[in-house]
Amino acid sequence: MTFYVSTPIYYVNARPHLGHAYTTIVADVVRRFQSMRDSQTYFLTGTDEHGDKVVQAAQKQGVSPRVYVDQISRLFRDLWPELNVRPDRFIRTTDSDHMAVVTEVLRKIHAAGDIYFSEYEGLYCFGCERFYAERELQEGRCPIHESEPELIRESNYFFRMSRYQGWLIDHLQSHPDFIRPERYRNEVLAFLREPLGDLCISRPKTRLTWGIPLPFDEAYVTYVWFDALLNYVSALGYPDGELFHRFWPAAQHIVAKDILKPHGIYWPCMLKAAGIPVYRHLNVHGYWNIEQRKMSKSLGNVIEPLEMRNVYGLDAFRYFLIREMTFGLDANFSESAMVQRINADLANDLGNLFSRVLSMTHKYFDGAVPELDPEVGRQYGLGLGPDARRTVDEYERAMEAFELHKALAAVWEFIGRMNRAIDIAAPWELAKKPATRKQLEAVIHSLLKGLRLISGLIYPVMPDTAARMQTHLGLDPEALYYALRDLRLWKPVPSGTRLPKTVMLFPRIEAAGEPAGASPAPPAAERGPETKPEATLEDFQRIDLRVATVLSAEPVPKAKKLLKLEVDLGERRTIVSGIAAHYTPEALVGRQVVIIANLRPVKLMGVVSQGMLLTAESEDGPVLILPEKPVAPGSGLR
Ligand code: ME8
């Protein structure tokens, strides 16, 4: 069997954070799981280095795109081994083999007549690097970046994606798990109910030069998504590479919901047009929020993976991510939730079980695994065999289906079953009388067997802990006892094996962010917001801030959050503001507020808004910024 897994290739416009770490750790987990089944595996990650966003980020730093991409790409590449993640290739879209494949695929699709030249006008989000249809926007803003898209008109090359709409719908219908979980398949199908437009795949060099030139027109570079998606085949040496032939038929992508559309629509259509078979599964997960809020630089709540690892330990961090998020749904990250899970699941359930069983083996058998008379075993064993089999079956099913949290839940159910079995069997009572010695042997023998199984099942998520457990069960650390085939056999730890002294797998953490004995880093929430990059006085002066008096205010029909205000700032203006949940119209009329007067007008729910109200962000929502005493309407700010 073969298995090929990819993560998105990350933009190099920001440092790696929790979200990137999650997806990449998931890829590592599923690839380790597949290797437990003796699959040949290939794991790809990398960085997406062309496009406007990267150029803008480089400009901000005052360096060339080339220097900039090298710098940030290295941060990603160097992070993965620190998280025990070892991809087979780290691809960069600036790699020459990748660029050659993009050129070749463009040539092929162009020659087949699926690329044409035309003029286009549309709303473009620079954050997403794509055009948006009006119906996709929320209150006129990009749903991901919450910024207003810009109206752009230019001549460009287009990929005839519309031609593949019918085929894609058929494919989704005949392959119900092509995109999973189902909610995302449904989302794509819903999108495909409307006519699918063609995809603009070029950018004029007059606007952007940092990209792969189109092979049929030197005046243009390739649109960054068309370039980036092809990494999944270029990394394998498409079209002739041995890796491509071996692994592409087993391709599975992992992405978050933010990039469902490029992966669920553009990419299959591109593959079809290029005559490449489509991937097998697209696995889509939700978003991590931080303490119930969106993770963002401006909120200063970006979680650094290495910091979490340093404070809580790598395996505990990996465990928390995989256990806490229901794959497919959003999840909430907080250090207190992490501490809770570490204490309950790792220190209590698993850690206690492990040290209890090992210390009993030392106490009653001097650290040597007892002999087992099979007859006595049948009579006095703990009856864990059927549970073990059920656990392995559910674990394998859930891992295969990307229900990673359920796979762990199944293991923890088995851990609970073992802890209860100890309490019922009460080995300390059996140890009191020579008559129950054989019974005691059977009980300890079963418990060690159970630990051996658990050490194998946790390997994909907690590889270091799995190895530590196995070393302490006297198993050869050089040999891998993780093969699912062997785990199913429910093998004992060989009798007579001498076990090293027990260890504490996971110390309890005493208070949030404060592991016992370590010096704690302040919780992320207390570190205060990161400031934005330096701005000059000229930057500030380009923004026209003015005091305005609210003349009237009314709700905008069918928009719960919006109020339409008429304001006086020397002239009359209409402003639409998203404060309806926090201010009633009556509370605003007659008040003086501060607005940005030279913001490009934008249409929100059919109303043109000619400015923006300034508010402070607070836990309870937006709070208006007001002058301390009345001033003439239109007064400027400085
Ligand atoms: O979109 N929660 O790159 P990107 C969970 N270059 N996962 C998150 C997350 C969060 N809060 N934030 C980010 C791009 N991610 C393109 C991809 S692929 C051909 C091109 C993860 O740097 C998640 O995997 O914006 C998401 O899909 C990805 O980072 C977006 O990374």
Image (spheres, rainbow, N blue to C red):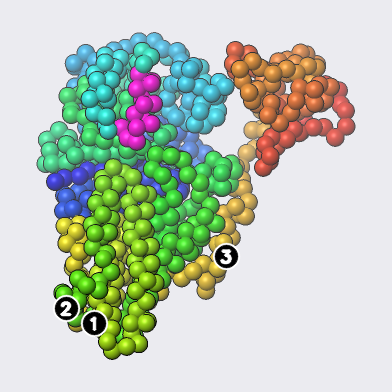
Q: Position of residue 123 (x, y in %)?
A: 48, 18
Q: Residue 438 carries which label?
A: 1
**Quarter in which the C terminus is drawn:** top right
| Residue at the (12%, 38%) spot, across then down | 245
Q: Position of residue 230 (x, y in %)?
A: 27, 32
**Main secondary structure of the magenta stretch:** helix
Q: Determine the secondary structure under disc 2.
A: loop
Cα–Cα gap, marks 2 and 3: 47 Å
The image shows residue 285, relative to residue 75, as above or below, that is above
Q: Report the amino acid beneath label 3.
A: Ala
Dot 3: few (<14), some (14–19), or many (≥20) neighbours within 10 Å? few
Q: In this view, does 594 lie to the left or right of 436?
A: right
Task: Residue under label 3, please give it.
Answer: 511
Whether residue 183 appears in magenta in the rendering, the answer is: yes
Whichever of labels 2 and 3 marks the residue nearer the N terminus, that label is 2
Dot 2: few (<14), some (14–19), or many (≥20) neighbours within 10 Å? few
Q: Do the residues labelled 2 and 1 touch (CB within 8 Å)?
A: yes
318 or 395: nearer the viewer: 395
Q: Do the residues labelled 2 and 3 touch (CB within 8 Å)?
A: no
Whichever of labels 1 and 3 marks the residue nearer the N terminus, that label is 1
Whether residue 164 appears in magenta in the rendering, the answer is: no
The image shows residue 57, relative to residue 291, as above or below, that is above
Q: Residue 373 carries which label?
A: 2
Dot in front, 2 or 3: 2
